[in-house]
Image: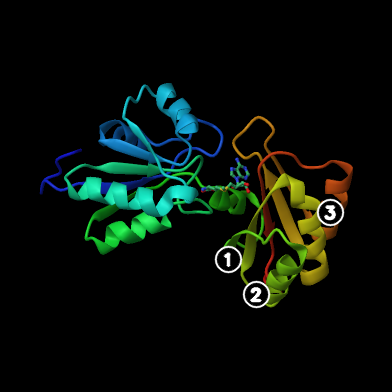
Amino acid sequence: MSSEKDGSGRLYVVATPIGNLDDISARAIDVLRSVDAIAAEDTRRTRKLLSRYEIGTPLVSHHEHNEDRAARRVVERILGGHSVALVSDAGTPLISDPGYRLVRLAADEGIDVVAVPGPSAVTAALSVSGLPPLPFRFEGFLPRKKAARRRKLESLAGERATLIFYVSPHRVGAVLSDLVETLGDRPAALARELTKIHEEVRRAPLSELLDGAAERPPRGEIVVVVQGERSE
Ligand code: SAM
């Protein structure tokens, strides 16, 4: 894909699995195989995925600590005629992952930015939550510090859309407790380790999810989905 029809390079934003490596699209494999380079958050992690599909494309590092510099380098490469695929460790790049600066810069330079869509924990969790799917509001990770987290949640108390949060397992008790206190005891779902061996979805009011987390702490990767205010 180094020479597209018009001879210019492209930036492909490629979703990768959130657990089960079979959840990659045929097109994603094709694109990863045929671009000149893959910009990856963690090159070692992406290498595992590439070796599973026997993809030998060179990897370049692109993570949040070097994003400005890395983005500029990738854009220069594309302007020189190469095509590059952006991936993150799991799921869709930019969704609580690096990539925004690269996409912005590429778009500003007139580069074709092409989506190769696929898994994301936000849509996977929402789709099995049993809560109203639309409208939804994805907040990503809440602030780590309690005061800032409470302020954020208070600002969401009147939101009618279904709310979706990414939650670190270390903070799940604190987050559920803040959710009950700021939003009230609403219907909710806790989805963890989706597509993996220990996949589990707990559907219950927030207070029950909180009690359950105390009795049986949910481990691994977690998404919490909460019904919006008075939504059906
Ligand atoms: N870009 C990714 C996406 O599209 O979902 C998200 C990256 S973010 C750094 C990682 C967070 O996503 C985890 O802490 C967890 O909240 C959520 N997550 C990722 N994989 C998951 C899975 N298999 N099951 C549940 N949540 C997951």
The residue at 31%/29% (across/down) is: 57
- Label 1's element? strand
Q: Is residue 85 visible?
A: yes
Residue type at tag 1:
Arg
- Label 3's element? helix
Residue type at tag 3:
Leu
Among the 4 quarters of the image, the one containing residue 140: bottom right
Residue 50: percent from the left, percent from the top?
A: 40, 27
Residue tagged 1 = 137
> Disc 3 to disc 1, how far (Cα)?
22 Å
Compared across the picture, whether 53 is left or right of 9 comes to right
| Marks 1 & 2, CB-CB < 8 Å contact | yes
Q: Is 25 rendered above or below residue 150?
A: above
Compared across the picture, whether 97 is left or right of 130 comes to left
Residue 115: percent from the left, percent from the top?
A: 34, 50
Residue tagged 2 = 159
Residue tagged 3 = 210
> Which quadrant holds the C terminus?
bottom right
